[in-house]
């Protein structure tokens, strides 16, 4: 950070990535801000800048201030971290200490010392506050320390799974020999070993993945398990809609011996919604009128599959949103990208990490996901380039990830 960037940072005031602190703040206060920034997406703490943006400057020498900040990062944070320290002399002679915290740390959640306790903090706008239980759980999940998908779903027993679909998966998709339907002990053993059931207290419950993939009524136990699909007539949201559907049920389809979907699941029903509403585009070629679908179906299916496979299911009461406009399709998946995953890496097809590994593997068994991890690059990006020469938008926003496909190149 150079002097011009520092002054611009101060002028823009505090935000989700910038915090101002006096040089004489309590160590617990500084550790709190470090924890909150690290748990979001990193950022900078400017020592010697007041809350109102005025520069009071470092009270102690730069060397002493650096040692003090580094000691807090090592002793008042769990796990300890090593931020980047620099200091800058302004034209009026005041000095500002700059503590830079990495954006892609794999060690979340970071806890800060508060008295004798260790507390997880989260960043909301320009404010750092104690994380809720759900927020802390998502941080553990993002760090892949906890797998939410194999967690037991309270109140959902083995009977909440659609055994016709479960048997169809093992017999018709995996081509395995399965126990007779009446062999409850054999089925329980198979489902436990497959993480579709989970031990809970003295009994067994269906796991999150089991309910999502094969549940009789997934939304009864997991209200966030579904897709809200809406088609608008124009390029903006409107009170009037062309079509809308709340798509509920198990993710997977019931497959016949010939590999045909007999009873469609959420993924195939969502793709069908897009297909029936996306329309077509036409053009003249050598005096003949040509026509094709507005989007390549492969790109649509890949975007839908990625949304259901990689969304953050710990975010309750939040559907996947599929929204169609006259000029584009937007698919919004709840949850930020997992640790270490960036939009650039997704575009290059070099990502192997998955938030929901079991979901991904089962959907791969069904043929929804390819084995090489190149789906976004080949089935979305390259497919859209070949189809109409447009570049899909991959956007990580506030607690969500969006894929946007264009019917034609947006006007400059």
Image (cartoon, helix red, strand yellow):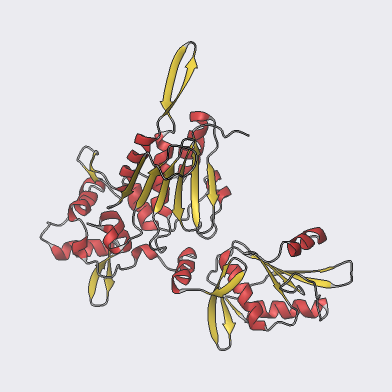
Task: Give percent across and percent down for residue 224.
Answer: 36, 59
Where 260 falls versus 318 (above or below)? Answer: above
Compare residues 333 and 337 and report the one nearer the observer.
333
- Where residue 74 sits, quadrant-wise, is bottom right
Task: Give percent across and percent down for residue 232.
Answer: 42, 40
In the displayed orientation, state which residue is furthest to the bottom. Answer: 116
Quadrant (top left/top right/bottom left/bottom right) for the C terminus? top right
In the displayed orientation, state which residue is furthest to the front. Answer: 239
- Where residue 359 sits, quadrant-wise, is bottom left
Residue 186 makes an appearance in the image:
yes
Residue 168 horizontal side relative to residue 223, left or right? left
**Point 36% across, 57% down: residue:** 358
Residue 369 makes an appearance in the image:
no
Compare residues 52 and 301 and report the one nearer the observer.
52
Task: Give percent across and percent down for residue 343.
Answer: 56, 50
Quadrant (top left/top right/bottom left/bottom right) for the N terminus? bottom right
**Point 30% across, 67% down: residue:** 153
Where 329 falls versus 214 (above or below)? Answer: above
**Point 66% across, 78% down: residue:** 30
Where 411 falls versus 396 (above or below)? Answer: above
């Amino acid at each position: 950070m150079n002097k011009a960037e520092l002054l611009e940072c101060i002028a823009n005031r505090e935000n989700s990535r910038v915090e101002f602190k006096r040089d004489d703040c309590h160590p617990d206060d500084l550790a709190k801000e470090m924890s909150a920034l690290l748990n979001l997406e990193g950022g900078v703490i400017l020592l010697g800048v007041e809350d109102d943006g005025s520069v009071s400057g470092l009270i102690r020498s730069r060397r002493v201030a650096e040692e003090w900040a580094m000691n807090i990062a090592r002793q008042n944070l769990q796990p300890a971290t090593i931020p980047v320290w620099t200091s800058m002399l302004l034209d009026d002679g005041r000095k500002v200490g700059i503590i830079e915290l990495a954006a892609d740390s794999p060690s979340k959640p970071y806890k800060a010392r508060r008295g004798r306790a260790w507390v997880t903090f989260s960043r909301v706008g320009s404010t750092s506050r104690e994380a809720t239980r759900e927020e802390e759980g998502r941080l553990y999940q993002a760090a892949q320390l906890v797998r939410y998908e194999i967690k037991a779903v309270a109140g959902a027993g083995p009977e909440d799974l659609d055994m016709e679909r479960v048997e169809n998966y093992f017999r018709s998709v995996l081509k395995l020999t399965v126990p007779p339907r009446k062999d409850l002990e054999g089925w329980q053993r198979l489902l436990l070993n497959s993480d579709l059931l989970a031990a809970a207290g003295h009994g067994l419950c269906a796991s999150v993945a089991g309910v999502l993939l094969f549940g009789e009524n997934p939304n009864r136990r997991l209200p966030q398990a579904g897709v809200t699909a809406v088609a608008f007539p124009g390029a903006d949201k409107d009170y009037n809609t062309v079509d809308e559907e709340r798509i509920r049920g198990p993710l997977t389809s019931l497959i016949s011996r010939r590999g045909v979907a007999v009873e469609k699941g959420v993924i195939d029903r969502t793709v069908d919604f897009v297909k029936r509403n996306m329309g077509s585009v036409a053009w003249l070629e050598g005096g003949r009128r040509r026509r094709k679908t507005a989007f390549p179906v492969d790109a649509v299916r890949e975007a839908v599959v990625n949304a259901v496979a990689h969304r953050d299911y710990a975010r309750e009461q939040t559907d996947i949103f599929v929204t169609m406009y006259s000029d584009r399709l937007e698919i919004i998946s709840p949850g930020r990208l997992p640790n270490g995953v960036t939009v650039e890496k997704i575009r290059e097809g070099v990502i192997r990490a998955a938030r929901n590994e079991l979901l991904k593997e089962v959907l791969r068994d069904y043929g929804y996901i390819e084995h090489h991890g190149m789906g976004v690059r080949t089935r979305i990006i390259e497919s859209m380039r070949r189809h109409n020469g447009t570049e899909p938008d991959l956007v990580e926003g506030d607690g969500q990830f969006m894929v946007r496909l264009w019917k034609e190149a947006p006007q400059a």
